Amino acid sequence: MVEDNQITDFLQRLFADIDYVLFFTVLLLISLGFFVLYSASGEDFVMMKRQAIHVFVALSVMLVVSQLSSKLLQSWAIWIYLGGVLVLVLVLVMGTVGKGAQRWLDLGFFRFQPSEIMKLGVPLMVARYFSEKSLPPRFIDIFWSLLIVMVPALLIAKQPDLGTALLVASAGLFGIYFSGISWKWIIGSLLSLVVAAPLLFHYGMHDYQRQRVLTFLDPTSDPYGSGYHIIQSTIAIGSGGIDGKGWLRGDQSRLDFLPERHTDFIFAVFGEEFGLTGAILLLSLYLFIIYRGLYLAFNGSDTFSRLLSGSLAMTFFVYLIVNTGMVSGVLPVVGVPLPLVSYGGTSMVTLMAAFGLMMGLRSKRRLY
């Protein structure tokens, strides 16, 4: 009886700081993702079982992470960041090559993608750095914070993995923005980026990355090669019309015209089957999650909590914009999955850990 009471008390404390509005909205999105994935996978029960395991692990991680205190996270931030940078260097030296990219570390019994660590490591480090400074930041503070962001982002881009590098960089840059940086620095940075864009295109990108940009500008220039993905994706979305063709009735996905339909291009499957109406409802669900994340950030217990939660919420926004933008032909294809809907475990765990941080940092009461 005593043990039962202890277990009950532990579970009550474990769920005490969960934001149930965000939690159940995220569960609703994941549940919707299962329906879409079932269709996109060709009714593959094995893939569905694996995704269910991914979700279980991700939810467990979220619950554990939500109990970590702001003070503990600040003390861990530098070690998570430095450890992440170290393994990114190891990836470039001895990483496993797959599909022309060197992104994985194979430990024999376990293989993982170290760049995922930095989606949390970079905003953690930026939030810690600014929590120890007077705000708004000085020029020297902005310089060092940009260095914190760019080192792992460049290492990830070197793999090459432009999509993850973009997400890691945005996570850190939003932390810098929320620190109270002056608009003159923001405008100056944007102008500098515009000026440097031609140099980055010619000397800072791989051939296939440059080809993706050119394909984005004119997909019909290579309709059976580099332009195939985007052409089939836009056909799928457009053919859905207002109300869609219905669940399990998408021709582009069912007849295997749509590539990567269970990962990067799953939004095209959704658009074909549920149409513009369904797409608006899905995007509204995403936007509500982002709004709730920013609300939790506003109610953070300290500067570190507010900066970290705000960065993570806006990174989720970048996930959404980049994926839906590339699938609909508005942005170049960079290989970013649709968050919480696309098949995959690593991204799911990282995102749910981020939600756990957002939920937990709004309160000072913790198990650890």
Image: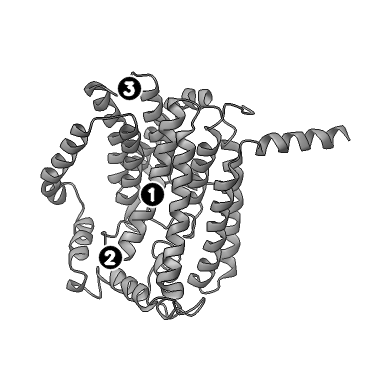
Q: Which mark is residue 135?
A: 3
Q: Foreground mark, 1 or 2?
A: 1
What residue is rendered at 11% in x and 46% in y?
199
**Dot 3 and dot 1 residues touching (CB under 8 Å):** no
Q: Along the line of sight, which residue is nearer the eye, 10 or 177?
A: 177
SS label for mark 2: loop
Q: Would residue 226 appear left or right of 122 to someone viewing this image? A: left
State whether residue 74 is above or below residue 250. above
Within 10 angstroms of label 1, few (less than 14), some, or many (20 or more) residues? some
Which comes before the other along the chain, label 3 or label 2? Answer: 3
Under mark 2, the amino acid is Gly
Q: Secondary structure at mark 3?
A: loop
Direction from residue 107 to residue 145 in the image, left or right: left
| Residue 5, above or below 30 | above
- For residue 317, the mark is 1
Q: For the point 31% across and 66% down, which residue is it? A: 328
